[in-house]
Amino acid sequence: MADPELDVPATIQTLAVIREEHIQFYDDELTGAQVADGTVYIPLRPICDYLQLNWSGQRQRTLRDAALAETVQTVEITTNQGLRPMFCLPLEMLPGWLFGLNENKVRPDLQAKVKRYRRECFTVLWRAFGPQRASPLGDTIEPRTGAELALEIAEAVAALARQQVDLEGRYTTMADYMRSHVVKTNQTLRRHEERLAGQEDRIEALELRVGDMATITPAQAGEIAEAVKLVAEALGIRDGSNQYQAVYRELYKRFGVGSYAHLTQPQYDDARAWLQRWFQRVAPPSPPDTPDIS
């Protein structure tokens, strides 16, 4: 039985998030949330809203599909109303859901946008999460060389092609897309192989850049997220409104990043100190055991 307010099956346990990304996709903002086992989940409701699709109908379509329904989870996602459990699919299953959309059944002015989501949405989300996916045990991933990063991208493309081939027998609209995409995938792989040949100097330069710009660890990202939460809650008490997005926007603007998880190691201490000062300015008077975000 579904909860009509949360739009999620009430019998499914809500998963906690260890990393959340907000990715700009043309004029829309896509959200992805990674849980403890490393799986990345994508909430479907915002995509339906962007495409002006009937949410109730799309939710039922998802639950009628056995392959999609068995992977549905509820995940706590940051919204303008704060943390909210939302109806999500794993990132790996998103192409199957997208290919079930038919641009010919939406208004003419939305057909190009639906086609763009079917063609590009998964790739944009994969790039945001793929190279930095945490292991299931939450261990820190060792820095990779340029060649390893290129190989990971190629393997991700190949994995997507295999998944598309598997789905081809079940979705007619998906089949047409897959055939052309597999050809493009093979062409992309050949171009990667050609570019990798004789590129040792460029790979070495890439390794140096990656090392210098190493991002913060998942544990450090969790500390930044907790600090943002405390500042937002203090502002909310003072102003009487939800301030989560405002704090995140100020953090991203100040440090020139698109997500707190993209902060570099040299920026980590500065970000914590800045949030600590902000919290001290806006926190209401409290007993001695008030949380300290430092």
Image (cartoon, rainbow, N blue to C red):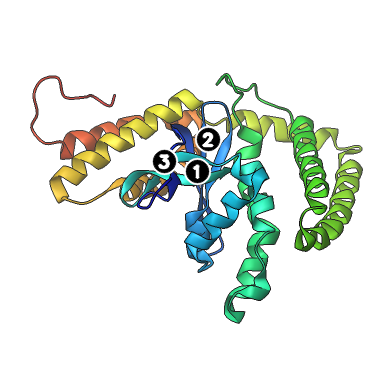
Tell me the distance, in whole angstroms, between the alpha carbons under discs 1 and 2. Answer: 9 Å
Label 2 sits on residue: 34
Relative to the observer, which residue lies in front, 200 or 119? Answer: 119
Q: Is residue 217 above or below residue 62?
A: above
Tell me the distance, in whole angstroms, between the alpha carbons under discs 2 and 3. Answer: 21 Å
Which residue sits at x=69%, y=51%? 96
Relative to the observer, which residue lies in front, 45 or 159? Answer: 45
Mark 1, secondary structure of its residue: strand
Of discs 2 and 3, which sits in the foreground?
3
Label 1 sits on residue: 21
Res. 270 visible in picture: no
Circle 2 crowding by C-alpha within 10 Å: few under 14, some 14–19, many from 20: many
Q: Locate residue 160, reporting x and y percent.
A: 76, 45
Q: Locate residue 239, reporting x and y percent.
A: 16, 50
Q: Identify which amino acid the numbered label 3 is placed on.
A: Ala
Which residue sits at x=67%, y=44%? 67
Q: Is residue 238 above or below residue 114?
A: above
Circle 3 crowding by C-alpha within 10 Å: few under 14, some 14–19, many from 20: few
Mark 2, secondary structure of its residue: strand
Q: Is residue 104 above or below residue 136?
A: below
Quarter of the image with the C terminus is top left
Q: Identify which amino acid the numbered label 2 is placed on.
A: Gln
Please report contact status of discs 1 and 2: CB closer than 8 Å, yes or no: yes
Tell me the distance, in whole angstroms, between the alpha carbons under discs 1 and 3. Answer: 25 Å
Q: Locate residue 27, reporting x and y percent.
A: 51, 65
Quarter of the image with the N terminus is top left
Circle 1 crowding by C-alpha within 10 Å: few under 14, some 14–19, many from 20: many
Label 3 sits on residue: 10
Q: Is residue 123 left or right of residue 25?
A: right
